[in-house]
Amino acid sequence: MRAVDVHVHPSTRGLDRHACNYFRRDLSQVPQTPEGFANLYLQHDVKALLIGWHPSTVREGARNSNEHVLDLVADYPKSFAGVLASLDTHAGDLAAVARYAEELVKNPRVVGFKFHPPDQAFYPSDKKFYGIWEVLQAGGKPVMFHIGFTVLGADTEGGSGIGLDYGRPIHLDTLAKDFPRMKILAAHPGWPWVEETIGVVTHKKNIHVDTSGYLAEQLPELFQKAIGGRLQDKALFGTDFPYVDLEKALGSFDKMGFKDAVKEKLLTGNAERLFELPTA
């Protein structure tokens, strides 16, 4: 296996136009059938973790869901290693959300969870969600939180109502302090708070970070140095597919000059360990 991609949105459901425009992605080059999507990852010898969350800015096409990505994993196990399930942080009954989380934790195809605080408009450190976090900590499966800038709503009036402050990395510091056994994965380098990301990931043993949203050579220089050095055991390869091209992302890592042992950790080893996946 060449890599584990820990940050994949299914291209089989409605795609975000803001993100496609930002990344200059030609949708004609993106496989939109389940077979084409699965074959892409199979051809590149990469196992993907599929995200069940659906962006609020996507109002066209079929809606993504936990059920959809679970079906994809069941149908294409050679391509997809598991699901990062989504939960509704705006539900009126958060106790019911916690009970739903307990059900998902028991599903072997659910290897973790994914939240997008800016789009879902919540602070991970808000104590009203602590009942849910208790369940996820007890379940032992990693929990991914988007941090930093988001292309959702980018360059629109008022950012389409999406606030970047919800994605400040420092909010994960509080969460990691209060839930020290929760496996937290920060999604993206957290620009414009890259130093804050590195500080939080360095300080809290239970926080990791992925490289998604960038080709490797586009990552902030300080972040590149960190994942090749001090954070080499805590950084995981991710693309943000379909917005970032899988083949280009893999080729980009090959050009970075990471030591072979470091590259193995970033592309496969750290993900296998954190998500308890079968080793290649």
Image: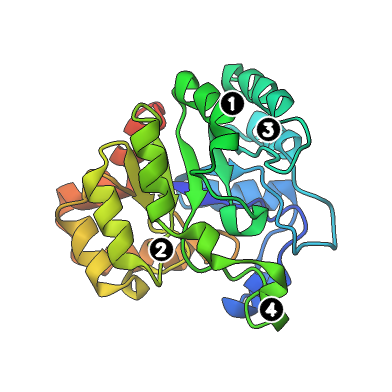
36, 56: nearer the viewer = 56
Task: Tell me whether circle 1 and circle 3 mark residues in contact (CB < 8 Å).
Answer: yes
> Mark 2 highlights which residue?
190
Cβ–Cβ under 8 Å for marks 1 and 2: no
Task: State which quarter of the image contains the N terminus.
Answer: top left
Say left or right for 48 vs 169.
right
- In screen coordinates, is 272 left or right of 205? right
For residue 109, the mark is: 1
- For the residue carrying disc 3, how many other residues have a C-alpha within 10 Å: few (<14), some (14-19), or many (20+)? many
Q: Position of residue 48 (x, y in %)?
A: 52, 44
Query: Of callouts 4 and 3, which one flags the residue occurring earlier in the amino acid sequence?
Result: 3
Can residue 3 be seen by looking at this rendering? no
Tell which residue pokes out farthest to the front in this image.
Answer: 127
Element under disc 1: loop
Tell me the SS state at disc 3: helix
Q: Is residue 31 visible?
A: yes
The three-letter amino acid code for the residue at tag 2 is Gly
Amino acid type at mark 4: Gly
Q: Earlier in the sequence, mark 4 or mark 2?
A: 4
Residue at 22% across, 49% down:
202
In the rendered image, which quarter is residue 184 located in? top left
Real-space Cα separation, disc 4 to disc 3, in angstroms: 35 Å
